[in-house]
């Protein structure tokens, strides 16, 4: 499988090495998403099987449509475009063209997250009833991240889209479609200088608090920030009828009245994003080779479902500075 990557950030640092490290996969080119000539030339290439779109979300629509129109299978990063309307059009165009389409919810292939999914599905804590997710990070505050698309709502920015999309996907995948949505967005750092030092007002969130309910009746709360004063380990707790399933850092534990049982533990990786992405790259290689996408692989359908939830949160009221 020959892969071409659009993206000099996550695309070049993580996606390209992941595909290059998979047997039967070769990365033939990596181009800047802001180089329109290079992107156009890449999409016109006939020696490419899959185009991986890891441009900023305000360029997803343009780049995905170019790739699809050229007949390529496509992997697109999250957040999937700037809105559910853009997501729907990209999904519909890909389906009409008959190409394979994948959404970069690579966390489904993270070992700890897969352990949580498997344990919840196997009834390790009985019937799931409630999920609580917390992730506090200082990645946009210490050191202060310069102004860019992440802090511009019109460009598809915001911590909910950038990071919350992964957690929304996990709850949909594990506990069923989201049928009730509420929440607040917050902006702790209201102004940021760009790379040249010019100050800009931030129009996108750097934190969020969500309350959701799945079609299986599971209540879900999520609280996250990219502008906390320090990093704290990720925490996810699934409360079931018979026990509690907990992911904290790199460990997954089942707590029951009879005691605790560790399901998974791993040492931190030098590049913590690479192992899950490489497992996803292997799955994509197989799907492209066999021309078949397994039901649990994330596709543009999942990207659209997540975008609908995010749009509903954004429309339910934003708590600003």
Image (spheres, rainbow, N blue to C red):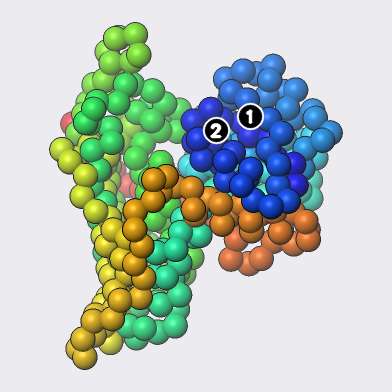
Examine the rendering and report whether any part of residue 277 can be seen: yes
What residue is shown at x 26% (from left), y 51% (from top)?
Answer: 135
Asked if residue 315 shows in the view, the reply is no
Provide the residue designation for mark 1.
Answer: 30
**Which of 88/98 is in front?**
98
**For mark 2, does the 10 Å Cα neighbourhood hold few (<14), some (14 to 19), or many (20 or more) residues?**
some
Q: Which residue is located at x 46 percent, y 59 percent?
A: 110
Q: Which residue is mark 2?
A: 12
**Residue 1 placement (x, y as % from top left):** 75, 47
| Residue 74, image x, y percentages | 68, 43
SS at badge 2: helix
Asked if the residue at tag 2 contacts the one at tag 1, i.e. Cβ–Cβ closer than 8 Å, the answer is: yes
Answer few, some or many: residues within 10 Å of disc 1's Cα (few below 14, many 20 plus, some between 14 and 19): many
Query: Between marks 1 and 2, how big is the CA–CA gap?
Result: 7 Å
Q: Quadrant of residue 260?
A: bottom left
N-term mark: 1 or 2: 2
Q: Position of residue 180 (x, y in %)?
A: 37, 62
């Amino acid at each position: 499988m020959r892969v071409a990557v659009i993206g000099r950030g996550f695309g070049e640092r993580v996606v390209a090495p992941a595909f290059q490290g998979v047997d039967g996969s070769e990365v033939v080119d990596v181009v800047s998403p802001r180089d329109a000539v290079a992107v156009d030339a890449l999409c016109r290439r006939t020696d490419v099987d899959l185009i991986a779109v890891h441009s900023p979300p305000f360029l997803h629509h343009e780049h995905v449509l170019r790739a699809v129109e050229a007949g390529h299978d496509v992997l697109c990063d999250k957040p999937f475009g700037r809105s559910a309307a853009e997501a729907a059009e990209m999904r519909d165009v890909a389906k009409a063209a008959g190409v394979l389409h994948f959404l970069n919810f690579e966390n489904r292939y993270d070992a700890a997250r897969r352990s949580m999914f498997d344990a919840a599905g196997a009834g390790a804590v009985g019937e799931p009833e409630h999920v609580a997710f917390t992730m506090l990070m200082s990645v946009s505050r210490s050191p202060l991240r310069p102004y860019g698309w992440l802090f511009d709502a019109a460009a598809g920015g915001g911590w909910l889209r950038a990071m919350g999309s992964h957690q929304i996907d996990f709850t949909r995948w594990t506990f069923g479609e989201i049928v009730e949505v509420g929440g607040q967005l917050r902006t702790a750092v209201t102004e940021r200088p760009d790379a040249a030092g010019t100050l800009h007002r931030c129009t996108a969130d750097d934190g969020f608090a969500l309350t959701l309910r799945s079609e299986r009746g599971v209540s879900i709360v999520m609280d996250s920030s990219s502008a906390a004063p320090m990093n704290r380990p990720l925490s996810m707790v699934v409360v079931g009828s018979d026990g509690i399933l907990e992911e904290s850092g790199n460990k997954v534990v089942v707590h029951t009245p009879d005691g605790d049982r560790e399901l998974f533990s791993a040492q931190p990786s030098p590049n913590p994003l690479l192992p899950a992405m490489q497992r996803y790259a292997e799955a994509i290689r197989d799907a492209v080779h066999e021309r078949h996408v397994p039901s649990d692989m994330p596709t543009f359908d999942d990207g659209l479902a997540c975008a609908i939830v995010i749009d509903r949160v954004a429309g339910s009221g934003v708590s600003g500075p």
